[in-house]
Structure formats: structure tokens, C-alpha cells
Image: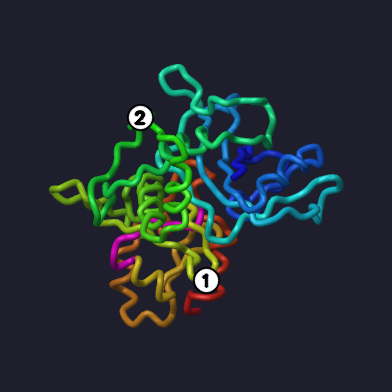
Amino acid sequence: MTFGVFMHKDGSGYADIPEVHYQFPKAYLSRAKQMVGDWIIYREPVKIPRSKGFFAVAKVERIIPDPDRADHYRALIEEGSYLPFEPAVPHKIAGQPVERDLANAQASVRLLSNTDFARITALGLPDDDTLPRVGELAPPDRVQDPQVPFEIERPIIQSLVNRPFRDRAFRRAVLHAYDARCAVTGWKLINGGGRAEAEAAHIRPVERGGPDSVRNGLALSGTAHWMFDRGLIGLSDELDILISRQVNDRPSVEAIVNRSGKALVPELAAMRPHPAFLGWHRDNCFKH
């Protein structure tokens, strides 16, 4: 197995869509080729303000010449493999680098040791039941360095392709990003046991090619989730809440939409619904 790190910065000059492809210059081609068919971890540079650190894992399917930029290539991400970390893993814990077997910390594309891959993934994807409708909301600041047994990367990889594990990780990431608040109603209902009423909804369903990405997710109450999946409500690219003409009780639907008429989304732009997924929902699900 050959694991790797892809450095990504939102708003950079590279045409990255982490869920879909990663653009890089020719200088990294030989290194990136070693990762084809294996898993990489996305990392934000240390120097950017409020860096997320290590924030997602994905599998490289193949590499192609970049269609838009000379002497550049794209690592295509295997459909359905992208998974965000929650919590994001900081660059250091207790003053020690989380990525310990560094050969070149400045390289945007670099190899990652098996031990580092196992450690970072275990920190970013704790396998627990602390999820709304399953368990408690996990505190966003809890980060502990687990003891990583030798060759633990194999069971971790098995988890990465396991649907129930991915569903739990997706719910945790989306509900943390939205602070467990429904994007449509604005409700943040928590029961006595600490469980959130809101659910994590895919904008483009997994079974129809949608990734387990926060940008392909919304926190929705049960009723709003039901309506969204059936195309009775949708979102514009500007996040206006759209109500289908086929709704039989429009006043009742309008009554539960928050007063702004817009979806309540995370402040961080990188966590907001991506127009590509919203457009897909309007074209394929929303009943005009």
C-alpha cells in the first residue's frame, strides 16, 4: 500500500474539487502515480489562518493530463471514496507533529507512512455511536492520540468502504458543521439525552453518484428531509429555499421555512452546499 498527502487550500489557483479531482504540476507526477489505487489524506497548509489541518480521506482512481492547464495533471478521486474527518486533525497534538515520518513537509504531494496514515485516520474518523439518532453529539474539541497497533491500516481501510461506518462519519461531519440546526426551519431541537432532531441529508444521493462530503450535505429536520428527498423543496445556487408548485399544502410548508427564506448554512464557505450538487438536485429531484 502506498498512502499519500495532497495539500489543498480553498481559493488557491488550482482547480481542485477535493471530492472529484486534485490538480498538481508535472513535478509531482512520478510521486502521485505511486498512489493510484490507494488512499490519500487531504491537508490544509500550516500557514493559512485557522488551518483545518488534515480534513478528509479519499482514494485515487487514476491520473490524467489536465485538460485546462499545460504541464499539469489531475488525480481523479474514486467515486464514493471521499470522506471528511470530524474532528479535523490538527497539525500537532501536545506539541508533537501528527504526521511524524516526514520526508518533505513542504511538498504539496508526498508519500505518507502506513503508521501516519493509520494514526491520522483513526483520529479523524473515530468509530463510535455518538451521533444524532444513534448517540450523543461528539464534542468538536476532543482529540486524543490513540495507540495505533502495527498494520492497523488494513481494518481502517475496511471501515472506509463500509457503508454504515461512512454514514455515521457523514452525519457527524454535517451536524457539526451545521451546529445540529436544520438549514430550512432553523430549528435546533435536542432531546434530554443530547440527541439532535436534525438529520444529515445528501443533496445528491450516494446511490446516484453523490459523495459523502459536507458540501453535498444539509442538516434537515425529519419533515424537511422528507420533502427535500421527494423534490418538494430545493435550493437555488444563492441558497434561496424553493417550494415546488406540486406541494398540496403550501401555506403549511411556508410556515416552517425560517424567516430569511434562505438556507441556514455554515459560515465557512468551504462547508456550504456546492452549486454543482444543488444544480443536480434541481435538475433531477426538484418538482418544478
For disc 2, the neighbor class at 10 Å (few under 14, some 14 to 19, many from 20) is few
- State the SS at label 2: loop
Please name the residue that numbered disc 1 is placed on.
208
Residue drawn 31% across and 49% down?
Answer: 180
The correct choice, above or below, for 147 with respect to 66 in the image is: above
Residue 141 colored magenta? no
Expressed as whole percent of the image width and height from the top left, the position of residue 71 reads 85, 45
Report whether 31 appears left or right of 140. Answer: right
The N terminus lies in which quarter of the figure? top right
Residue 222 colored magenta? yes
Expressed as whole percent of the image width and height from the top left, the position of residue 228 reads 40, 69
Do we see residue 183 in this rendering?
A: no
How many numbered circles does the render carry? 2
Q: Which residues are magenta?
A: 214-224
- In the foreground, 239 or 61: 61
- In the foreground, 90 or 9: 90
